[in-house]
Image: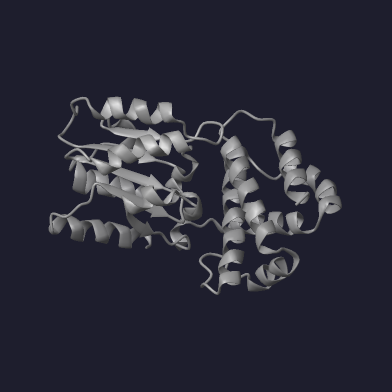
Amino acid sequence: MKTEEIKKYFEEKDSLNSIGHAYLFSNTNYENIESAIEYILHSIIFKKDIKIEDNPDVYFIEPEKNVIKKEKILDLEEKLSKTSQISDSKVYIIKECEKLNASAANCLLKTLEEPSENIYAFLITSNMDYVISTIKSRCQIIQCEVNDRKLIDEEIVSKTISMIKIIESGVKAIAYNSSELYKSFEKDELKKVLSFVELFYKDCLNKIYGINLEFFYNNEDLIFKTIENNDYKKIIGKIKILNDNIDLLKYNLNGNLFIDKFLIEIGRL
């Protein structure tokens, strides 16, 4: 679903009084569907025009050092047990839910299995394959479309293609080009580019599986060339490295060292 389709879907559910307690948004990240979630919270759940970050009844969980630990879920459960501050409802949003470790996932299952009234869960993942099946089975799954043109910055896409070509050109070329990359990106921009590079490799998997391309449908030549030079396991490995490094960008890192480390790591596959 695209952003407007997600909004319409929840409007229809609301009109039928059938809003579920837990939703899993797949194939996306929080930034891509933030406007849809804001709309759902403002217009359907809370019916109050309060910014998400200012709403005391909305709780965010996201990975720290690339993992979500049990302690975060226990802290969430304690907060959910308290009285709502602005309405009868509470919402928790788990970014990158595929990064729940086993203890955290098992802890969350109890909350999902025995939902309290007026508590709503929004789980978000860019990689459904890493979400455990028991969590999937307890959520209503919404497949998101990443090719919503309103979310695309063409300059970012252009830099994404350049980054992909450097990655695919081999370790020697990476070492030669890395110094130029230092000058190319601000931290936030680099995060967007790496997120799009991750989507590119997921489109490579789509092509391998015979599924329609979701984002880089205008770059089939580059996708075919990438598939020729990478088997399935290597593409999965690159997606994992990208995912890990995107998470590291939350921290105050030296940009030059970060890019060096990332390119060398992905170039060794």
Q: Quadrant of residue 218?
A: bottom right
Rendered residue at 74%/36% (across/down): 256
Residue 57 lies, in percent from the top left, at 25, 32
- Camera-nearest residue between 4 and 28: 28
Give the left or right position of residue 143, taking residue 252 as reference.
left
Q: Inspect this view and state whether residue 217 appears.
A: no
Rendered residue at 44%/51% (across/down): 32
Give the left or right position of residue 227, taking residue 202 as reference.
right
- Camera-nearest residue between 37 and 89: 89
Residue 27 lies, in percent from the top left, at 46, 56
Residue 56 lies, in percent from the top left, at 27, 28
Residue 210's place in the image compared with 47, above or below, is below
Give the left or right position of residue 143, taking residue 194 as reference.
left
Rendered residue at 56%/34% (across/down): 250
Q: Inspect this view and state whether residue 211 appears.
A: yes
All told, the count of numbered labels is: 0
Color encoding of the figure: one colour
Q: Quadrant of residue 189?
A: top right
Rendered residue at 60%/35% (across/down): 248
Looking at the figure, which quarter contains the N terminus?
Answer: bottom left
Residue 104's place in the image compared with 45, above or below, is above
Give the left or right position of residue 247, taking residue 75 as reference.
right
Residue 3 lies, in percent from the top left, at 36, 58
